[in-house]
Every structure is written in C-alpha cells, then in structure tokens.
Image (spheres, rainbow, N blue to C red):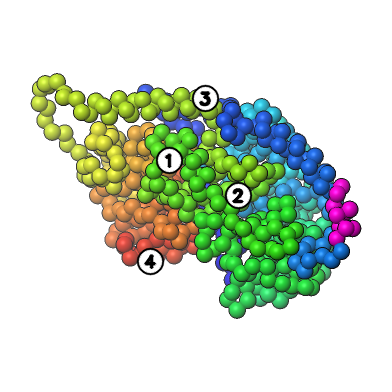
C-alpha cells in the first residue's frame, strides 16, 4: 500500500544520509583542496545566460498569458484530453507540490537560486547575475519554501521547521517536531505531523497550529482553496479538505498516490487490479481517464508538461504535454549529456558510463535538478545534476558551487603529477642498500585488496601505517567485540569527512578515509573492513544491488559474539547519530531502501540490544 510515497520518505530523507554529506574538509600534507569559494560560470552554463534566459521567459510567459484568452476563443471544439481553460489561481505557493514530493531541494527568488547540496549537507545560494555562490546554511534542510522573502524548510535532522533569512543565513526554529511534505500557500505552512501522520497547518502571522485532518494522510497537494491528499487507509482513496478547515470530501474510489493539479484537473498515480497508471479527472472526481499505463515512482508538473520516471526503467525521464492533442509520453534522453558533462571535468576519462536510475526531479524556471544512480567504468555512484530544459545541457552539481578556475588548475596539476608518476615507474631505480621487508597489521595489503582494488602498493602501505597507528592508540586487549566495533566506528566518524566527489583523492578506498580523511560510502566501508581485520573482528564489505534505492551504496556487516549485524558508518557520520548501527537485514532494508544479495553474506536476523 505504501509503495509509492515511501519513495519520498526513504528515498529522499535517507538518500542524503547514504549518498553522503560532509563538513569542513581535512587535508593531508602536501595535498591541494579544491576551494568552495565563488563560482565562475564562463563555460557552457553561465549564470549570466541564466539571468538573461529568466528575463526572456518572464516576457514570453506574460505574452503567452495575454494570448491564451484569444486562442481559447478561436478554439471551436476542445480535444477530449486537453486541459480546459479555468479561472486563474491567485494562491502564492512556496514551492510546487511536485518539487516537494521530490524533496523540495531547489528554489529561486528574483536574486538567487537556492539548492540543497547533498554532498556538503547544506543549502547553497547562487547569485543569478554574477554566478557567485556561497553557503547559506548548514544542515539537512529539505522541502524549501519561499514566503515573503523568507525561506522555510524542514530540518529533518533536528526534527524542526526553520525560517532562514536568505540574505544573512540566520536560522530561527519556529516549530519543534518532525514533519513531512512541508509546503506553503500564502502565509500558511501545511505539513504532515510525523507523530501521528495528521494533516496540519501553521499560520505564520499568529503561529497558531490547526489540525485539518486527524487521520493518517500521505502526499498532500495544495490547489487554490483546498488541500488534496490520499488517506493512508486500506482503500487509499483521494480526498480534499478546505484550507480553512471543515469536512473531508472523497474524490475517487481508486488507490491513489502523488496528486498534482493542472487547470482544475487532477493528475495522479492510480492502482487498480494491481496495475498502475497515470490518471486524470476533475476536481470532483468526474470524467476520470487513464492517461498512460506506467508504474511511475516520481511525478512533477512543470509548466504544461507532466514529467515522470517509470518504475520499470528508472533510467529514463518521460513527459506528457498536457496541452497537446495527443498526450503520448516522450522521453528525455540525458545519458549521453551526463556522460559528456562528467568527462568535461574528470581527471581520468570515464570510458564506460551507464545511467541506472533517477532519484527525484525538481524544477525552477528552465532548470531541472535531479539525483541519479550511475555506473562509471564498472563502479556504481550517485551524483546530482542540473539540466537546462530549453538549452538541453547538463552540469554536475558538484561543480556548480566551486571556483571553476581553481578546480581546473588543481585538476591540471593532478593530471601532470599522475603522468610524471606513471613515467617514473618505468625508470631503473638507482642502486640502494637492501632494507628488510616491512611488516603489516593483520589484513590484506596486496594489490587488488578489498581496501582499494586500484590502490598502488605505496598507497596500501600508507593504509597499513594508518591502521597500525590506530592499533597503537588503544588497548584492545580488554575490549569486548562490541567495544572494538564501537571504537572503530567512532574513530572513522571523528577523522573522516564525506568527499565532495568520488573521482578525486581515492575517495572510494580505505586510503581516502584513513590517509586523506575524505571518503564516500565505499571508502568508509573499506576502511571499516581494514580496522576490523586488524582487530580480529569478522567484517564484510557489502554493495547494494541494482534494485536498491541507491544502487551505488556500500556498508558493512560485523560479527559480535558470533552474531552478525549491519553497520553503515558513512550514513551515521552524515546524520550525526547512529541511525544505521548494528541492525538486522530487515530493519536496515526498511530504513534505508537498500537491497543486496543476502545469500553472499551472513544473515543478520536481529538488531543488537
């Protein structure tokens, strides 16, 4: 029953935790850190172009609105599926319902773009005229809404609703308690209270909170003077309730998810006889029709197009032109553009690229912000991108908030050093006195090791030195298995930060976590494996499969007193608490949306208590 909206609760809320978010980066001696300072948009995706494009679009939209009435009068007989003309909607929304369903990560005003950046766990602000970006506020801030010059967000980590001053970055907590689906209409905030899943609203003028629906609801959508939602019951039908409060009205009798409204027509994902389809009907449920049969997992309305990702093939985005005579889905082909964008900045060219699946769609003006799982040269990752809908261009978000000149200089230098190192490998070394063979802590420090299959022997030696230093720092002789696992977990969380990009500084290896002190999930998991091996604790490195919410994620299984448990160090380090700590297979799978080949590792039947 909860198949669809769990995508948001787990996919968005947990994706940032397991895809990662960092704090201030550490730097190993002699290593150069790429600056997070100003952004130069000189190449292919300039903010000057964005500003000009925005102004052009505003003029175009104004002209379109003026011509709509005359075009409607010329229309002699509207097509059966074509959206009818309606009275204008004067409601001032904080963000679109589709964006909120996709996490509410992207927002704009007249001066800035705002984007929650999963890798850095913060909201960045980019000046639309100059292209200069800076960090506005730290924290896990989702469901961004703009109301009268202030940003309101769901701080999921702190379980509170906050107000952000977009000029100063000052944060004020205005409500304590967990919420989901935070959205604004006029000067009111609407949300689902996670304590009982009821629908509520909060007046920003009086700060009075009102319960609109005292039953569990999901996927609400505000349109004009009503809130539309699915009741979280066995039937899962669509209902609406007046924004000022009152009786609920049932709209349909079909399992329904993710309603969104265009010109007084409700588009939603329906399920009947175990078959899913995007359907359309009037605000009162009349004239219901199937638009397209699809098991959509994300839907978002942008201008006159309904975008969606099909659950059977998440590697494609489709859209339906709601003003077209024939509403036939068309695909948005981005795989080649993403590969080109990745290789535009990569130190080492990615020779084989595959887009595995999209994980949320957010729109503002001409841009679609999205996260996707992908495979590059056989390794699975997850990255964020911006797609210019009209210009048909893609930019990796990881590069949207750095000084491009600084980054390219660093990449050029790194490429030069890599070539010099490669050339030196073929030279005959001068005669030198023989030294005794070095010793290693327990573990595998041979080329091809699980600690980093592509690490050189010199880098593996550095990992061994870091592990030995860890062993020398504690007295493990009196520790229990639990104490050893806890020590390794806390040690990694204390020394390592989430790397902003997997391609640099061996972020997907134990070297990244233990030597450079920056890693992505794979680096955390490989480092945890190295520490456990050294302490004599059984440990497996586990990789998600293609059916997981994030197919690129990795974590560990550890053995305590003969029993196996799941531990996700990177997810815990990002969240700031032990969200994924010594869990059973079923608990971790339900919490994270992860799936994996359970037959390849020991079973974890119970949580640790």
Residue at position x 52%, y 44% from top?
337
**Magenta stretch in the rendered image:** 66-75
Image disc number at residue 605: 4
What label does residue 280 carry, if any? Answer: none
Near mark 2 (Cα within 10 A), the count class, few <14, some 14-19 or many ≥20, is some
Pick the front one: 14 or 495: 14
> Residue 405: which numbered mark, if any?
3
Q: CA distance from mark 1 to mark 2?
A: 25 Å
Q: Which residue is mark 1?
A: 502
Picture residue at 80% right of the left edge, 70% below the top: 284
Q: Position of residue 122 (x, y in %)?
A: 58, 39
Residue 45 is drawn in which quadrant? Answer: top right
Q: Is most of the magenta stretch helix, strand or loop?
A: helix
Distance Cα–Cα, label 4 vs label 1: 32 Å
Q: CA distance from mark 2 to mark 3?
A: 35 Å
Which of 294/186 is in front? 294
What kind of element bears circle 3?
Answer: helix
Sort mark 4 into few (<14), some (14-19) or many (20+) by Cα contacts within 10 Å.
Answer: some
């Amino acid at each position: 029953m909860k198949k669809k909206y769990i995508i948001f609760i787990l996919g968005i809320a947990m994706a940032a935790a397991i895809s990662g978010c960092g704090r201030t980066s550490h730097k190993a001696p002699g290593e150069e850190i790429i600056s997070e300072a100003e952004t130069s948009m000189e190449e292919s995706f300039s903010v000057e172009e964005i500003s000009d494009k925005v102004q052009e679009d505003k003029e175009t939209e104004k002209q379109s609105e003026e011509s709509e009435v005359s075009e409607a009068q010329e229309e002699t007989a509207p097509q059966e599926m074509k959206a009818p003309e309606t009275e204008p909607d004067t409601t001032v929304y904080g963000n679109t319902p589709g964006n909120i369903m996709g996490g509410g990560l992207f927002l704009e005003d007249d001066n800035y773009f705002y984007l929650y950046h999963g890798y850095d766990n913060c909201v960045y602000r980019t000046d639309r005229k100059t292209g200069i970006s800076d960090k506005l506020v730290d924290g896990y801030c989702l469901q961004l809404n703009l109301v009268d010059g202030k940003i309101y967000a769901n701080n999921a980590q702190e379980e509170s609703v906050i107000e952000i001053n977009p000029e100063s970055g000052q944060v004020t907590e205005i409500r304590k308690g967990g919420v989901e689906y935070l959205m604004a209409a006029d000067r009111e905030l609407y949300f689902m209270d996670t304590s009982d899943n009821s629908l509520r609203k909060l007046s920003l003028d009086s700060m009075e909170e009102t319960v609109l629906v005292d039953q569990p609801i999901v996927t609400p959508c505000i349109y004009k003077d009503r809130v539309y939602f699915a009741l979280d019951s066995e039937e899962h039908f669509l209902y609406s309730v007046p924004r000022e409060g009152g009786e609920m009205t049932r709209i349909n009798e079909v399992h329904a998810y993710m309603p969104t409204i265009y010109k007084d027509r409700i588009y939603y994902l329906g399920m009947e006889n175990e078959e899913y389809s995007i359907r359309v009907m009037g605000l009162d449920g009349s004239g219901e029709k199937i638009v397209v049969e699809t098991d959509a997992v994300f839907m978002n309305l942008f201008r006159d197009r309904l975008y969606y990702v099909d659950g059977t093939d998440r590697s494609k985005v489709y859209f339906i032109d709601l003003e077209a005579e024939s509403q036939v889905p068309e695909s948005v082909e981005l795989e080649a553009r993403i590969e080109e964008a990745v290789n535009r900045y990569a130190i080492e060219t990615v020779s084989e690229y595959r887009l595995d699946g999209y994980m949320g769609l957010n729109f503002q003006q001409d841009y679609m912000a999205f996260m996707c799982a992908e495979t590059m040269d056989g390794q699975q990752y997850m990255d964020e991108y911006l797609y210019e809908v009209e210009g048909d261009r893609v930019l990796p978000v990881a590069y949207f908030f750095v000084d491009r000149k600084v980054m390219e200089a660093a990449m050029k230098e790194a490429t030069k050093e890599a070539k010099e190192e490669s050339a030196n490998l073929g030279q005959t070394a001068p005669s030198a006195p023989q030294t005794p063979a070095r010793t290693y802590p327990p573990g595998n420090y041979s080329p091809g090791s699980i600690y980093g299959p592509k690490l050189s022997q010199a880098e593996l030696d550095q990992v061994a030195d870091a592990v030995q230093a860890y062993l020398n720092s504690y007295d493990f002789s009196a520790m229990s298995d639990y104490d050893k696992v806890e020590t390794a977990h806390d040690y990694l969380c204390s020394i390592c930060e989430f790397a902003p990009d997997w391609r640099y500084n061996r972020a997907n290896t134990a070297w990244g976590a233990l030597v450079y002190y920056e890693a992505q999930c794979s680096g955390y998991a490989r480092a945890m494996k190295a520490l456990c091996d050294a302490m004599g604790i059984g440990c497996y490195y586990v990789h998600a499969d293609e059916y997981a919410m994030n197919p690129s994620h990795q974590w560990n299984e550890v053995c305590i007193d003969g029993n196996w448990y799941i531990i996700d160090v990177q997810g815990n380090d990002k969240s700031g608490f032990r969200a994924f700590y010594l869990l059973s297979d079923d608990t971790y799978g339900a919490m994270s949306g992860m799936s994996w080949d359970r037959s390849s590792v020991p079973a974890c039947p119970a949580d640790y208590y």
